[in-house]
Image: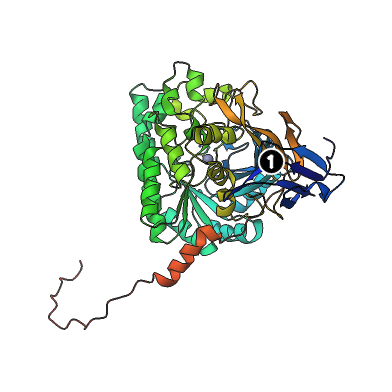
């Protein structure tokens, strides 16, 4: 792609930020928003001018949860950092936060460098990394500090699922939380009860249930709800902020709400999949179709779940959205053709998240456009401490922008999507809301459906610890919530003698 003009004027649109909507032109130079105001035409004579009349001008989406080219179930996710970030941009997402995810006893620092090596030459949009803590030991404890101080990591994910692979025991989870707290990092949790899943999935196989429906039946939503409540309880006991990744069910969402009600610092992340479709698909007669939806935690067969989660997202009970984009083609999913436990877990989402949330949230009348911007971009930027560099249309912010046509429609299909995968869980869904123009680092990379990205042009975005929205309450509590002993006269009466310990 030829280098486009580095000066860009977006004229006549309505800027939508998380706090307000207003008519303004937006002028960008060298990848930064330089001016936001009315009638800016005199600002530069050689700027490329884009007409946004009647359109919305919003901060580019931030997908908080992706797994590009993840090595998983013996294979590798089909969307690599090139195809995955290209798909992201095609849908209006201008930044992803992916996961470094090594196995037990692997060095977190080495894994981080390996993932950077995979991502840097391929990424087409800005990105950052969370790091998985999949085992516990002195080396992990030290590496977490280095990742925070030297590598711009401020979030670590722990798993209560994937027994013997990623799962931590409760005492290890507590130690990881305490370390996150010491470092000003955010503790993220994949909340499902891994012991129950291991036992119940074996039971399903013994009952002859080998198809994708077994994947949901061995881990119904109570299994997610229990782990979510447990993780929040443990985090709150050590005054550590907690972020529940992929809140997939009513039970898990209710556990998040109960945590918030009690005043715990907890964030809940539903994903495009659970907001846009449901787990009835596991009972589909076509095996490939059913397997296409297999992910952990599973989508829920209760068809009222997506609307329920969207309502909570709209009113603030849930906070922000990702996708868990982790795609596998039919021949990869087929590793589990005769045993659902071997179906690689993961679905698409990074391309369609913005449209699905607009359709099922804003177009459906559940969410207003400012809240839409909050849950697709701004809150992610604030929670992960990259605000106002990202997540807002404001002078000085990165020129990551979407010019959105709220009325235009498109129908999602694997035939037209930009993923490197042969299946789309939203196949056939008609969505209002189209990213007419997507601007990444001040360059137009999507123009009325034409996608022109530059491999390797995305930047790694380092993130500092102690995000204000995550840590200000936590630090204040450390000062003022100090347990105190009751002052009393010492007991002076008789004490029985216990027999000596044998
Ligand atoms: N979610 C999923 O099914 N695949 C990606 C890995 C994970 O996050 O569990
Ligand atoms: Zn994930």
423 lies left or right of 165: right
Q: Whole-percent x and y of residue 401?
A: 69, 43
Residue nearest the viewer, comparing 245 with 183: 245
Residue nearest the viewer, comparing 218 with 386: 386
* Element at label 1: loop
Q: Whole-percent x and y of residue 126?
A: 69, 45
Q: Whole-percent x and y of residue 300?
A: 41, 31
The extreme front residue here reads 39
* Residue in view at x 47 percent, y 22 percent: 290
Asked if residue 491 is positioned above or below residue 225 in the image, the reply reads below
Q: Quadrant of the N terminus?
A: top right
The extreme top residue here reads 285
Q: Quadrant of residue 151?
A: bottom right
Is residue 113 shown to the viewer in this render? yes
Q: Quadrant of the C terminus?
A: bottom left
Q: Whole-percent x and y of residue 391?
A: 62, 49
Count of numbered labels shown in the rendering: 1
Q: Mark 1 near ligand 2 (CB under 8 Å)? A: no
147 lies left or right of 49: left
Q: Which residue is mark 1?
A: 13
Q: Quadrant of residue 193?
A: top left
46 lies left or right of 103: right
* Residue in view at x 51 percent, y 58 percent: 470
Residue nearest the viewer, comparing 105 with 77: 77
Q: Residues within 10 Å of mark 1 (few under 14, many from 20)?
A: many
Model colouring: rainbow
């Amino acid at each position: 792609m030829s280098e486009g003009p580095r000066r860009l004027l977006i004229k006549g649109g309505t800027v939508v930020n998380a706090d307000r909507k207003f008519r303004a032109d937006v002028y960008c130079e060298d990848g930064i928003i330089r001016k936001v105001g009315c009638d800016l035409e005199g600002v530069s004579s050689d700027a490329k001018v884009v007409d946004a009349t009647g359109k919305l001008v919003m901060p580019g989406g931030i997908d908080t949860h992706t797994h590009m080219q993840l090595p998983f179930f013996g294979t590798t996710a089909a969307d690599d950092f090139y195809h995955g970030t290209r798909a992201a941009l095609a849908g209006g997402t201008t930044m992803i936060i992916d996961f470094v995810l090594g196995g037990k006893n692997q060095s977190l620092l080495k894994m981080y460098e390996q993932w950077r090596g995979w991502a840097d030459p391929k990424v087409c949009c800005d990105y950052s990394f969370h790091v998985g803590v999949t085992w516990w030991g002195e080396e992990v404890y030290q590496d977490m500090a280095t990742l925070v101080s030297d590598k711009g990591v401020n979030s670590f994910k722990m798993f209560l699922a994937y027994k013997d692979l990623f799962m931590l025991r409760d005492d290890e989870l507590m130690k990881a939380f305490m370390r996150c707290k010491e470092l000003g990092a955010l503790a993220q949790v994949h909340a499902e009860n891994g012991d129950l899943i291991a036992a119940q999935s074996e039971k399903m196989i013994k009952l002859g249930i080998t198809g994708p429906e077994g994947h949901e039946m061995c881990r119904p939503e109570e299994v997610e709800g229990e782990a979510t409540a447990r993780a929040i309880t443990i985090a709150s006991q050590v005054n550590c902020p907690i972020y529940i990744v992929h809140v997939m069910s009513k039970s898990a969402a209710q556990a998040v709400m109960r945590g918030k009600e009690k005043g715990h610092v907890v964030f809940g992340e539903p994903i495009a999949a659970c907001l846009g479709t449901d787990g009835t698909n596991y009972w589909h007669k076509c095996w490939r179709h059913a397997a296409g939806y297999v992910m952990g935690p599973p989508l829920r067969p209760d068809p009222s779940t997506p609307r329920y989660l969207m309502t909570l997202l709209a009113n603030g009970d849930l906070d922000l959205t990702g996708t868990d984009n982790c795609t596998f083609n039919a021949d990869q999913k087929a590793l589990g053709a005769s045993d659902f436990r071997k179906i690689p877990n993961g679905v698409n989402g990074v391309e369609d998240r913005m449209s699905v949330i607009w359709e099922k949230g804003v177009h459906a009348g559940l969410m207003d456009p400012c809240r839409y911007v909050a849950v697709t971009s701004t809150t992610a930027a604030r929670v992960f401490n990259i605000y106002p560099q990202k997540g807002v249309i404001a002078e000085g912010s990165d020129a990551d922008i979407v010019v959105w046509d709220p009325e235009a429609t498109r129908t999602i299909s694997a035939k037209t999507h930009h993923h490197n995968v042969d299946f789309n869980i939203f196949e056939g869904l008609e969505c209002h809301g189209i990213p007419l123009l997507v601007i990444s680092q001040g360059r137009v990379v999507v123009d009325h459906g034409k996608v022109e990205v530059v491999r390797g042009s995305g930047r790694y975005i380092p993130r500092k610890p102690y995000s204000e929205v995550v840590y200000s309450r936590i630090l204040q509590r450390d000062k003022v919530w100090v347990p105190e002993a009751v002052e009393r006269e010492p007991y002076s009466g008789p004490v029985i003698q216990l027999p000596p310990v044998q």
